[in-house]
Image (spheres, rainbow, N blue to C red):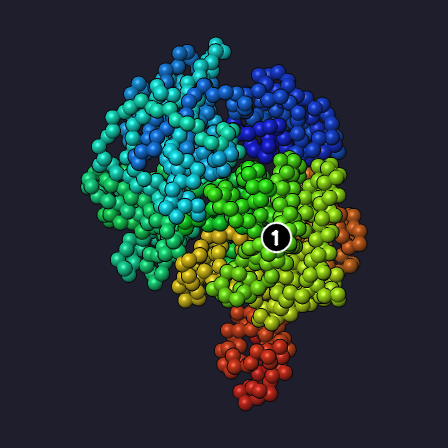
């Protein structure tokens, strides 16, 4: 028995994070027992116990401990767990360390606004042997800190050498992106080992989000938040004799200027190593930033993956282009050795066009790197920017070799917790594309895209993708920071949630986007089981609902407001090139108003706020009546005839006749040749609602569709991330448009939530939090061959797998983690199977459901129906033509098949045989039947 994944506030060994109160969590592995019976948490400081719960019914998902936290203090803790098998185990010793808390700073803000980026430095000479050392630091816009041992700071050489040999920590783009008008983050670094000897503490500042062009606020690109760069740092030395020394930024620090003379998130970075050095001068004190200085909430952004060049391309246009083989967000390393004065120019893009470098879809973002050589060999790596790219055009480098260029994928350091693999390589690529889309758009903020002049924290994208994000990566802390930032924006906006967080001055609000204030906290709570997220965001949830309901009460102002609606759906007036879907925006606005009221009521119930629970429940009921009055006929029929409207009607219980609505939904797809027309609102709920409506065949048909519009269409065209539009690229490989076209947008990757929850079957029960109770009922389709899924939930590791052994035999496996239970429904299982009491999976069966406790189980059985669709000449032609392999086969065998008018495609080939009588030889139908059965 082992106790693992011990975390505080969902972080492993957090150093200097914001921590109002610690919440502890842990998992148990390799136990004989099935569940925890009691546990004990002990927290110590310098070996002295400061909190001891005693043995009690502690919650391994989230156990808060009331204790007064001292500033700059390391605490250790252990948890002891007892199981129902009589076992007892103690965890390894874990730790967390507080930041400065509410303690004052022994430091001043210093700064500047020169074009050349400043390097601030201070000589540090410890007076005694150092026991421990911490650096507390905030540099705006962005900073990197270095410690150079020795008496002479100049001995370190270039900033390139500093970064390679003296950098403090691995973080990039600190202190990250947030609403600087309300709060500013500082980071804490353990620099004990570096401070064993005297040296020079150096800090390089860049522009970043704070002091660079960013957002929509100013067409001239002036910074929204900052008027200059700023630095605050305090080095705390604790000596072996117990005394302390604090060394902070002030006018005694020196400043000189680096050879970086331009940096910007959108436009890249420029550096000139032929510039004359600038004499060092005394630092100047500056006014502090507007926002309050607090301990960090952001997870570190790091270069977490290195990608060697997959290919070096010499294009028809004569360009030298590096292909990473994967679209990423991040940076690069480039080895060069060129004569003095040579200009090295790197530009990046996501796709090629006619084999040539292309970047028009980046709009005004220059996304480049410029370096002027001093004649020496260098390994170049930008400091204060990042790019969204797969291809890099390199100019100015003689005889560039593939090994000279390395891509660096940068993203917030979220542990991976989901793995899903099938027997279909294109579907596997789709899952990988979604994972890469999350990495590329989780650079501190859940952005819409990482490449063009946007890269902003669009709330709608984050809202629809949040469940998929939580399946793929441990996203609690990441979303907690984003939601906190959201709440700070609302405080000055009467509860309104701007479309992007941080807002950078953007004032627009919209349904389904602003509703992220209610949806994401509830998603996070359900996935992780920690009500702290609801406690922290409850005022935000209420503020949003109260704001939009107030608008609605004023002459139906909310439904009349501008909304994005079913953004980028294909059924709107603009067709495939439009942006607005056909589903009435007012309908979506009211549906989401009700949904947010429901979620706020649920949050109130969890928090024991009975009055608020009653109020928001009644508001939700009131909105349901209004929606039905306005948009539903007396018969219960939805008056809006779009795929998304019907999906919303099912999702939110708006219809009183689910069967009729499901039939209408099926017909909407049939009328569109089985293709989707949904956008940002309809697509994320598509798979689940089709499955719940009994339309699994349609759901799988959409998944496997390789034609436009569909997920595998873009996979077939070589996508390595998720596209913004269903037709971001046309079938001939040309980019469909440049005004709003990203090849790395994760929203439509939300289909992967359905794959984990329904295809693999790891779906949390309605009454569950933290995946304690999971309903496993995999939706099997033999075209996938097999599915293997693992999900490291807040409770532990769930595993499911199924394999179509042949057309009539299924192998199924499941692992239930410690402390959990599973309700398993086996697909196509004969009733007699449940009588096999020698198999532990059938030890407890109720109404055809296997009730499982912790453990691993497996069974192989003969199914009651074929596991794959058997096609024949009796199958409707429309259905046959929806399968690419069959369509290709039929077109070859019966060329006239393409001339069948649409209104006749609901008939089968046998029914249409008279029309082909002159072309079909005797026995042809039988031959076709045999071939079709195999092709299915």
Position of 322 with respect to 899 (left or right) is left
Query: For the N terminus, which image quadrant?
Result: top right
What residue is shown at x 59% (from left), y 25% (from top)?
93
User: How many neighbours does mark 1 have within 10 angstroms: few (below 14), some (14-19), or many (20 or more)?
Assistant: many
Q: Work out whether residue 476 or residue 780 is closer to the camera in this orientation and state it.
A: 476
Query: What residue sits right under mark 1 in the picture?
Result: 558
Query: For the C terminus, which image quadrant?
Result: bottom right
Give the percent coordinates (x, y) of residue 515.
60, 48
What residue is shown at x 40% (from left), y 64% (from top)?
733
The image shows residue 347, relative to residue 257, as above or below, that is below
Q: Work out whether residue 413 or residue 609 is closer to the camera in this orientation and state it.
A: 609
Q: Which residue is the extreme one toward the top?
A: 241
Give the percent coordinates (x, y) of residue 291.
49, 32
Position of 631 with respect to 373 (left or right) is right
Give the percent coordinates (x, y) of residue 430.
52, 55
What residue is shown at x 75% (from left), y 61% (from top)?
656
Q: Place residue 735 in its image quadrant.
A: bottom left
The image shows residue 932, relative to residue 232, as above or below, that is below
Position of 849 with respect to 490 (left or right) is right
Q: Work out whether residue 699 or residue 494 is closer to the camera in this orientation and state it.
A: 494
Q: Is residue 603 visible?
A: yes
What residue is shown at x 45% (from left), y 40% (from top)?
304
Q: Work out whether residue 924 or residue 112 is closer to the camera in this orientation and state it.
A: 112
SS under mark 1: helix
Q: Which residue is the extreme one toward the bottom?
A: 918
């Amino acid at each position: 028995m082992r106790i693992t994944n011990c975390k505080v506030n969902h972080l492993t060994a957090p150093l200097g994070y914001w921590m109002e109160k610690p919440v502890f969590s842990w998992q148990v592995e390799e136990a004989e027992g099935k569940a925890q019976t009691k546990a004990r948490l002990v927290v110590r400081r310098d070996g002295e116990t400061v909190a001891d719960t005693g043995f009690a019914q502690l919650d391994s998902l989230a156990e808060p401990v009331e204790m007064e936290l001292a500033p700059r203090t390391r605490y250790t803790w252990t948890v002891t767990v007892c199981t129902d098998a009589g076992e007892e185990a103690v965890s390894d010793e874990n730790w967390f360390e507080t930041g400065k808390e509410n303690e004052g700073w022994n430091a001043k803000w210093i700064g500047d606004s020169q074009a050349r980026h400043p390097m601030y430095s201070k000589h540090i000479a410890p007076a005694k042997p150092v026991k421990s050392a911490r650096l507390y630091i905030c540099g705006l816009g962005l900073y990197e800190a270095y410690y150079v041992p020795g008496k002479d700071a100049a001995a370190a050489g270039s900033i390139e050498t500093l970064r390679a040999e003296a950098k403090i920590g691995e973080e990039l783009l600190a202190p990250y992106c947030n609403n600087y008008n309300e709060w500013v983050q500082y980071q804490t670094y353990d620099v004990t080992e570096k401070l064993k000897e005297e040296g020079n503490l150096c800090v390089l500042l860049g522009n970043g989000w704070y002091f660079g062009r960013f957002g929509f606020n100013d067409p001239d690109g002036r910074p929204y938040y900052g008027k200059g760069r700023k630095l605050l740092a305090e080095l705390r030395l604790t000596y072996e004799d117990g005394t302390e020394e604090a060394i902070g930024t002030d006018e005694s620090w020196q400043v000189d200027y680096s050879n970086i003379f331009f940096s910007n998130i959108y436009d890249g970075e420029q550096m000139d190593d032929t510039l004359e050095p600038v004499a060092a001068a005394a630092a100047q004190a500056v006014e502090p930033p507007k926002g309050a200085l607090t301990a960090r909430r952001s997870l570190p952004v790091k270069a977490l993956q290195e990608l060697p060049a997959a290919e070096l391309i010499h294009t028809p246009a004569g360009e030298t282009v590096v292909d990473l083989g994967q679209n990423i967000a991040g940076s690069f390393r480039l080895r060069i050795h060129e004569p003095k004065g040579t200009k090295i120019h790197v530009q990046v893009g996501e796709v090629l066009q006619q084999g040539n470098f292309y970047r028009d879809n980046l709009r005004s973002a220059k996304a480049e790197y410029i370096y002027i050589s001093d004649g020496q060999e260098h390994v170049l790596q930008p400091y204060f920017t990042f790019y969204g790219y797969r291809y890099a055009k390199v100019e100015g480098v003689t005889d560039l070799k593939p090994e000279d260029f390395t891509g660096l994928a940068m993203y917030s350091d979220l542990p991976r917790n989901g793995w899903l693999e099938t027997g279909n390589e294109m579907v596997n690529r789709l899952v990988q594309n979604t994972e890469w889309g999350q990495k590329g758009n989780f650079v501190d903020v859940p952005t819409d895209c990482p490449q063009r002049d946007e890269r902003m924290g669009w709330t709608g994208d984050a809202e629809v993708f949040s469940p998929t994000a939580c399946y793929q990566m441990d996203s609690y802390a990441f979303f907690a920071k984003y939601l906190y930032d959201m709440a700070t924006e609302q405080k000055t906006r009467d509860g309104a949630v701007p479309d992007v967080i941080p807002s950078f001055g953007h004032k627009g609000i919209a349904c389904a986007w602003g509703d992220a204030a209610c949806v994401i906290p509830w998603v996070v709570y359900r996935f992780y089981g920690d009500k702290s997220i609801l406690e922290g965001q409850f005022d935000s949830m209420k503020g949003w609902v109260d704001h939009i309901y107030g608008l609605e009460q004023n002459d139906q102002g909310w439904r009349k407001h501008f909304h994005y609606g079913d953004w980028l759906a294909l059924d709107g007036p603009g067709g495939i090139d439009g942006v607005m879907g056909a589903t009435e925006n007012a309908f979506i606005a009211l549906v989401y108003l009700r949904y947010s009221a429901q979620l706020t009521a649920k949050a109130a119930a969890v928090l024991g706020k009975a009055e608020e629970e009653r109020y928001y429940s009644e508001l939700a009921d009131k909105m349901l009546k209004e929606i039905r009055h306005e948009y539903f006929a007396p018969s219960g029929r939805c008056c809006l005839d779009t795929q998304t409207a019907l999906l919303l009607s099912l999702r939110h219980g708006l219809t009183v006749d689910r069967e009729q609505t499901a039939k209408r939904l099926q017909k909407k797809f049939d009328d569109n040749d089985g293709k989707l027309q949904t956008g940002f609102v309809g697509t994320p709920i598509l798979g689940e609602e089709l499955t719940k409506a009994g339309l699994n065949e349609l759901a799988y048909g959409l998944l496997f569709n390789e034609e436009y519009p569909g997920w595998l269409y873009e996979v077939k065209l070589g996508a390595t991330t998720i596209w913004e539009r269903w037709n971001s690229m046309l079938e001939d490989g040309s980019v469909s448009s440049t005004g709003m076209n990203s090849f790395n947008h994760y929203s439509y990757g939300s289909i992967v939530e359905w794959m984990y929850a329904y295809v693999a079957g790891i779906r949390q029960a309605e009454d569950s939090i933290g995946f304690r109770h999971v309903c496993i009922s995999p939706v099997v389709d033999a075209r996938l061959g097999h599915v293997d899924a693992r999900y490291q939930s807040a409770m532990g590791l769930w595993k499911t797998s199924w394999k179509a052994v042949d057309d009539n035999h299924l192998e199924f496996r499941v692992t239930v983690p410690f402390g959990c239970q599973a309700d398993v429904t086996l697909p196509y299982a004969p009733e007699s199977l449940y009588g096999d009491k020698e198999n532990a999976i059938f030890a407890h069966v109720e109404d055809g459901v296997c009730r499982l406790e912790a453990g691993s189980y497996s069974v192989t059985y003969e199914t009651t129906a074929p596991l794959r669709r058997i096609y024949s000449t009796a199958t409707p032609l429309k259905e046959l033509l929806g399968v690419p392999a069959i369509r290709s086969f039929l077109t070859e065998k019966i060329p006239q098949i393409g001339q069948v008018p649409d209104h006749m495609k609901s008939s089968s080939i046998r029914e249409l045989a008279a029309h082909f009588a002159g072309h079909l030889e005797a026995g042809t139908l039988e031959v076709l039947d045999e071939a079709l059965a195999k092709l299915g």
